[in-house]
Image (cartoon, rainbow, N blue to C red):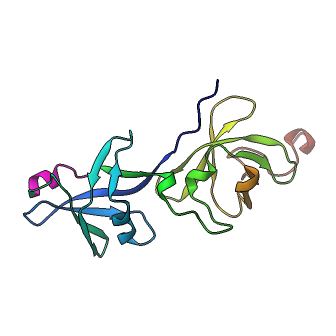
Amino acid sequence: MASPPQDPLILVGRVAGGFGVRGEVRISTYTEAPMNLAAFKTLKRQDGSPALTIASARPTKDGVICRCPGIDSKEAADALRGLRLYVPRSALPEPDEDEFYLTDLVGLSVRHIATNVLLGRVKSVQNFGAGDILEITPDLGGPTWYLPFTRAAVPEVKIGEGLILADPPALVGEAEGPAEEELGDRD
């Protein structure tokens, strides 16, 4: 029997350290507006266990400063530095039409836009600093591969159909024109 789908956790912030001497916590937010983080009240760790409860918050130039029960010294707040903060996907507002959260891409089928060949399924969405990329599990097995999440490489996303239409860039060493056997002998 298949287990019911889980409510994935979405990364919404990271503890940047303490602020002041009374245990306030500085949080760098990944939400559209920094104060949106305070609306969640209870933030979780990646494993789903409780991380922080926000009693009050105020905006700062790069996030929010929060008062959290149980954190009453700068040392206690600084000890949380680097803690990633998550909320369940169901806690987020529904996106507008033609919008989606990156987590909604996980599990979608990826087909080549020109040939309709099934390339695989989205395993995860990563960002190593140069932009979002989709990690694809190939349909025919083998190692996962990465697809840049750009308009050129991913011209269409059809969340309702569970489909991504892709035009993957040529790989290094892969011929972009006719196959090598068609080029003839160059000696």
Counting from the top left corner in percent of width and height, residue 135 is at 60, 44
| Image x and y of residue 103, in percent | 56, 51
Instruction: Identify the residue shown where x is 29% and y is 47%.
Output: 51
Percent coordinates x, y for residue 32 in the rendering: 46, 70
Q: Is residue 153 above or below residue 141?
A: below
Q: Is residue 147 above or below residue 92?
A: above
Q: Nearer the viewer, residue 148 or 36?
A: 36
Question: In this orientation, does residue 63 appear?
Answer: yes
Tell me, yes or no, whether the highlighted magenta stretch contains residue 39: no
Q: Quadrant of the N terminus?
A: top right
Counting from the top left corner in percent of width and height, residue 21 is at 7, 63
**The C terminus lies in quadrant:** top right
Q: Is residue 165 visible?
A: no
Q: Is residue 154 left or right of residue 69?
A: right
How many marks on residues? 0
Look at the image and give the residue range highlighted in magenta: 74-81
Image quarter for residue 182? top right
Could you say which quadrant of the image residue 109 lies in?
top right
Identified at 60% across, 52% down, the residue is 104
Q: Residue at x 63, y 32 (%)?
A: 143
Main SS type for the magenta part?
helix
**Front-most of residues 93 and 80:** 93
Q: Is residue 114 left or right of residue 174?
A: right
The residue lying at 65 percent from left, 61 percent from top is 150
